[in-house]
Image: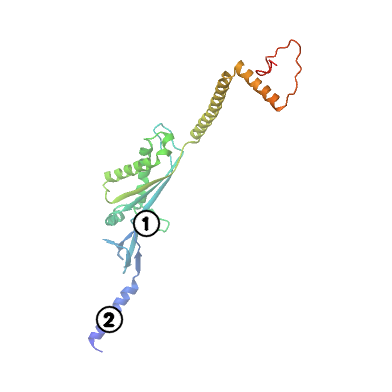
């Protein structure tokens, strides 16, 4: 066997051993990764979606798009100093892949969170801490009774306030706030009860007002009808009824008491 063949065989064996010693990591769309060597050193090179070989180290995979953080049971104060009973806000943000190395190596775990799948969510705790302040600033611009009717504007204001804090902290272009959703905005129970009483009272007043106006209209109609009924019109109607009765035979004879007035008869009958 030649030395060339022996060399090729040894090389293939080393390559096979190397590949066998490591493993492959799949990075999905919307994710990026960082390579960590067997010595624990993180390589400042962003890995893109696809199948990546770990070698003797490991690959840390991070979600960089559409990361969600939800802050529940917030109690911001409104413009009229009403403290909301409860407000739930969900923030969706993205991380610039080129900032992975900085966030992973320069920020401690207190700034990150853990997703349900066990994956490290970079800067999620950092964003969570900013939400409360941004929500307080945004809700403070609206009276309590107008909060729910202005949720879209409040969401936009929260987004603006969050983005501004990120800019001031030097993270503009590294973290992007994609969307804000206010899932719940409950008013205090006593305020809701008070509003319901006012609505019920207004409803009762409105119903009584309609009844009163209807009665007034009916009275005006009766008054107008009464103004058209005169002595002459009543006498005319009476004469028409008697005339029709004589003509159709309903009345065939009448007994007239001597000296009685005949003016109740239709015209022409009293002269006979």
Horizontal side of 259 relative to 150 (left or right) equals right
63 on left or right of 192: left
Q: Quadrant of the C terminus?
A: top right
For label 2, the residue is: 10
**Helix, strand, or loop for circle 2?**
helix
x, y (%) of residue 49? 32, 63
Q: Residue furthest front?
A: 272
- Name the residue beneath numbered marker 1: 120
Q: Mark 1 touching mark 2, by CB under 8 A?
A: no
Which part of the image, by quadrant, shows the N terminus? bottom left
Q: Nearer the viewer, residue 236 or 195?
A: 236
**Residue name at image x 40 percent, y 46 percent:** 181
Please provide percent x and percent y for residue 123: 34, 51
User: Going 67% across and 23% down the picture, which residue do you hit?
Assistant: 243
What is the x, y in percent for residue 52? 32, 67
Q: Is residue 43 visible?
A: no
Whether residue 4 is visible here, answered yes or no, is: yes
Depth order, front residue of 41/75: 75
Q: Camera-side residue: 183 or 88? A: 183
Q: Quadrant of residue 147?
A: top left
Q: Residue furthest top?
A: 259
Relative to 93, say whether 41 is above or below: below
Total count of labels: 2
Residue at 32% across, 73% down: 19
The image's mark for residue 44 is none
């Amino acid at each position: 066997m030649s030395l060339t063949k022996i060399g090729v065989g040894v090389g293939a064996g080393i390559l096979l051993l190397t590949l066998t010693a490591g493993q492959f990591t799949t990075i999905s769309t919307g994710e990026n990764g960082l390579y960590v060597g067997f010595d624990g050193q993180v390589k400042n090179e962003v890995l893109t979606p696809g199948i990546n070989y770990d070698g003797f180290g490991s690959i840390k995979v991070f979600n960089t798009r559409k990361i969600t953080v939800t802050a529940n049971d917030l109690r911001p104060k409104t413009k009229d100093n009403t403290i909301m009973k409860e407000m739930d806000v969900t923030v969706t943000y993205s991380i610039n892949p080129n900032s992975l190395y900085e966030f992973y190596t320069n920020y401690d775990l207190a700034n990150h969170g853990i997703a349900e799948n066990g994956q490290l969510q970079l800067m999620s705790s950092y964003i969570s801490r900013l939400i409360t302040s941004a929500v307080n600033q945004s809700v403070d611009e609206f009276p309590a009774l107008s909060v729910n009717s202005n949720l879209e504007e409040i969401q936009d204001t929260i987004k603006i306030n969050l983005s501004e804090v990120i800019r001031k902290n030097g993270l503009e272009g590294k973290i992007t706030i994609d969307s804000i959703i206010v899932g719940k905005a409950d008013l205090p129970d006593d305020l809701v009860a008070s509003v319901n009483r006012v609505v019920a009272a207004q409803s009762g007043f409105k119903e009584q007002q309609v009844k009163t106006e209807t009665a007034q209209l009916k009275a005006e109609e009766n008054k107008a009808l009464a103004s058209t009924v005169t002595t002459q019109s009543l006498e005319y109607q009476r004469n028409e009824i008697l005339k029709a009765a004589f003509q159709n035979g309903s009345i065939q004879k009448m007994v007239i008491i001597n000296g009685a007035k005949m003016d109740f008869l239709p015209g022409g009958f009293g002269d006979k």
